[in-house]
Amino acid sequence: MDGMKTAVKEVIVVGGGIIGMLTTRFLHQAGLDVMLVDQGQLGSESTWAGGGILSPLYPWHYHPAITTLSQYGQQHYRALCQQIKTETDIDPQWLPSGLVFTDDTDLAAARAWADRCGANLQHLADSQALHACEPQLAEDFHSGLFLPDVAQMRNPRIADALRTSLRLLPITLAEFTRVTRLASNDGRITGVYLGDELFHANKVILAGGAWTGQFPEMQAVNVNIRPVMGQMILVRGARDLLKRIVLHEGRYLIPRKDGRILCGSTLEMNGFDKRTTPEVAQDLLETACRVVPALQGLPILNHWSGLRPGSPDGVPYIGEHPDITGLYVNAGHYRYGVTMGLASAQMLADMIIGKTPLIDPTPYRLNAERTPTAEWV
Ligand SMILES: Cc1cc2nc3c(=O)[nH]c(=O)nc-3n(C[C@H](O)[C@H](O)[C@H](O)COP(=O)(O)OP(=O)(O)OC[C@H]3O[C@@H](n4cnc5c(N)ncnc54)[C@H](O)[C@@H]3O)c2cc1C
């Protein structure tokens, strides 16, 4: 640790979930001297816990700013996964499973959205079309929608691959080390405190997921991020039992490459309490078996929860603090931080190195107008 604090870092990134790890990767690639700090192991919180669907669940329900970041991820994750696999020999299992919806009540809104953003949407107008798309669906579903281009990644694997790739680079990584407060002087960031020790940096990026809103500097400018817990179960399944990611009334089933099936999830606001409950596991299993009867009798292999970094409308905060020069935020991605993470990390890295960001940053600014969704209030 002594060696770490002697020199002034160009950038310290606080929080090593997918957002912090990707941001660090891009800044290092641009030639900056970066340090990444996490209070636990890199990638072990929401990034580990999530489903890895590379799309919003009902994309037409969301702010266009979410669509823009998501589409970038959909186009570029495959290449990133290939690159990281080459670097680390860990396969994040990017898989183009497609996303099938078990009804078509949203057809008009979905078509309008698909026309606007050029997405490939298929209407599965009758039972035959629906079951040809996903043969394992229960017989009482008679029509649906299909997004064939939606892919997934396996969260623990992308977390492991990114962590391993960073460890192979000459980057200072401080795991199991908490940033207790920020240091600034005369409206400019000067560093972070790890415990009582000050580490100097010209720029600091807060990428602390659900914990980001706890820094007083965030509260001062209404960066409103709070934890929203999601519970998930993993069922044994069998290889090729389920072909598609299936979405039914807000809940989903995700078939992994080895046949295991993830079933999620809940939206629970209990602060930072991540305890799971057996009732929720049972409820998730019952929903899954109703949707895919072949799952009946299969054992639950694992049950866990994660804390999503909730924000009022799900649009992440990406940009510089309006009152503290050199302090940046990349957080609040709520339900879709994996999907949006690649574009947000690239966008913030571009801002920091002085390149025109690939996406207009206006809607993501810390002081941009945000209209809370019904889910949030
Ligand atoms: C059940 C569930 C299902 C999900 N499914 C999907 C999905 O299918 N698709 C999708 O796109 N998204 C999904 N998500 C959301 C997605 O996982 C998150 O939006 C994303 O992981 C957020 O990444 P992050 O890096 O901001 O946060 P995190 O992964 O939580 O990382 C934040 C890191 O910051 C560290 N930290 C915080 N404060 C400090 C501090 N003071 N000092 C040092 N370190 C600190 C933490 O230890 C943590 O490692 C899901 C989430 C859950 C919980």
Image (cartoon, rainbow, N blue to C red):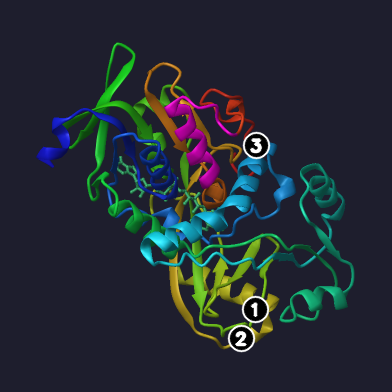
Determine whether, in the image, residue 122 is placed left or right of residue 266. Answer: right
Which residue does the image show at 38% across and 18% down from the upper left? 325
Eyeballing the image, is 299 above or below 342? below
Q: Is residue 348 visible?
A: yes
Location of mark 1 (residue): 242
Kindly identify which residue carries mark 3.
65
Residue 243 coordinates in the image, percent (x, y):
66, 76
Q: Which residue is mark 2?
A: 296
Element on which disc 3 rests: helix
Under 8 Å from ligand 1: the CB of mark 2? no
The residues colored magenta run 341-358
Work out how far the residue at label 2 is from the one at label 3, CA to CA, in angstroms.
40 Å
Q: Given the current orientation, which residue lies at the most extreme top position?
A: 186
Q: Secondary structure at mark 1?
A: loop
> How far across and how far down the image is residue 29, in percent?
39, 41
Quarter containing the N terminus: top left
Please, what is the three-letter code of the amino acid marked with disc 3? Ala
The amino acid type, in three-letter code, at marker 2 is Gln
Give the residue at the far right of this rendering: 126
Q: Kindly indicate the quadrant of the structure image that contains residue 297.
A: bottom right
Tell me the SS state at disc 2. Answer: loop
